[in-house]
Amino acid sequence: MTQMRQWLLNGHPRGRGLVADDFKLVTRDIPAPGPGEMLLKTQYLGFDPAQKGWMENVADYVAPMAIGDVMRGSGVFEVVESNGGKHPVGTMLAGSLGWSEYAVSTGEGLNVAEPGLPATAMLSILGTTGVTAWCGLFKVGQPIAGDTVVVSGAAGATGSIVGQLAKIAGCRVIGIAGGADKCAWLTANAGYDHAIDYKAGPIKQQLKELTPDGIDVIYDNVGGKILNDMLSFIATGARVTICGGISRYETGTMPAGPENYFNLVFRRATMRGFIVLDWASEFPIIRKRMVKMINEGKLTYQEDIQHGFENAPDTLQRLFSGANRGKQLLKL
Ligand SMILES: NC(=O)c1ccc[n+]([C@@H]2O[C@H](COP(=O)([O-])OP(=O)(O)OC[C@H]3O[C@@H](n4cnc5c(N)ncnc54)[C@H](OP(=O)(O)O)[C@@H]3O)[C@@H](O)[C@H]2O)c1
């Protein structure tokens, strides 16, 4: 085989949802590894809501993307050829090399897959997703045992890990997700004490009943009305962690700020956003601690695996339609 496929950026989806024309599939020659390089075969791709922001060039913490660039994204790769490269043939590596069936790399910026766990864990619980859940919860939310923690986007990749970590920290955990199925899964499998289905109607009354002493930590992945409703019930000294705002990623105009922000004053609360990359130097130690929790059976993770490189754009779209449960991946 001498040729490979790549997905290129073909449109900036600003102020709207993704469309098929935002991506272009091309065929190119498989590159040959130069001295010190390896040829990597992509086995899995990982999907993040942030990819839409990268396509739009609204995120200033990453380099801008130009039309014609290989679509940016994470993956798991197998070394299939080495020209004096860093790792032997057969090594599984993870990192961000884009939507390409093959890539050439020196190995810089790539991590060797954790032995004893499926290589996909490097994209889910041990990837950006897991460390985001950890850093957002522990460094920003700072829960203490006995706290009530409420998580939006709870059945997603990040949210489903946040809930378990908060339980391990001794908290009472309430998740907000779309649909009865996802909510049942949250309490049966993802460690949540209670789940609220925001697609079944207004959530304020349920939130009020479930948080009689107020919410100590909000972990928000969604923003908009859900954040506003959560802010209504914060306890004194609450920490409001802004991880993401997926409800606004497809809208053209910025929604007005939360009407309830003044509750931060009455409740002497803090609201803080974060970019997980700021703690990159700590990722190896955080991963180690999570591996221990996984091996002890304290932490589980859910992966949603789609198939076929040609389905990469549709797989990204699943994050915005809420089709994914747990970390969205694609097997090539
Ligand atoms: N700050 C950081 O450094 C950082 C790092 C990584 C990720 N993030 C953010 O963390 C959040 C979660 O990311 P993830 O990778 O774990 O994705 P995810 O939660 O697995 O996937 C997205 C989920 O969001 C929900 N959703 C989609 N559109 C929605 C809408 N309009 N209103 C309410 N919910 C909606 C859907 O669940 P339902 O079916 O429940 O609606 C969907 O399954 C994202 O906002 C992402 O941008 C931040």
Image (cartoon, rainbow, N blue to C red):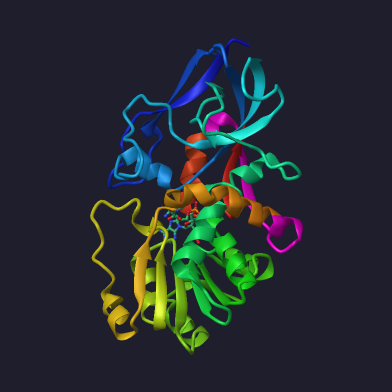
The answer to which of 266 and 24 lies nearer the viewer is: 266
Q: Quadrant of residue 266?
A: bottom left
Inspect this view and state whether residue 323 appears: no
Determine whether 290 is above or below 38 in the image.
below
Inspect this view and state whether residue 209 appears: yes
Q: Quadrant of residue 111?
A: top right
Is-magenta flag for residue 308?
yes
| Quadrant of image for the C terminus | top right
- In the rendering, at what x and y percent does residue 243 appear? 42, 59
Tell me which segment is drawn in magenta: 292-311
- In the rendering, at what x and y percent does residue 264 appear? 31, 78
Determine whether 210 is above or below 324 in the image.
below
Q: Is residue 204 left or right of residue 164?
A: left
- In the rendering, at what x and y percent does residue 151 appear? 49, 68
Is-magenta flag for residue 113?
no
Q: Quadrant of residue 21?
A: top left
Q: Is residue 215 left or right of residue 57?
A: right
- Number of dots carrying numbers: 0
Residue at (52% x, 37% y) in the render: 74
Hey, which residue is sitting farthest bottom in the picture?
Answer: 212
The answer to which of 209 and 98 lies nearer the viewer is: 98
Determine whether 118 is above or below 5 in the image.
below
Q: Is residue 71 left or right of residue 29?
A: left
| Quadrant of image for the N terminus | top right
- In the rendering, at what x and y percent does residue 38 appear? 60, 19
The answer to which of 326 and 286 lies nearer the viewer is: 286
Residue at (34% x, 84% y) in the render: 267
Determine whether 6 is above or below 48 in the image.
above
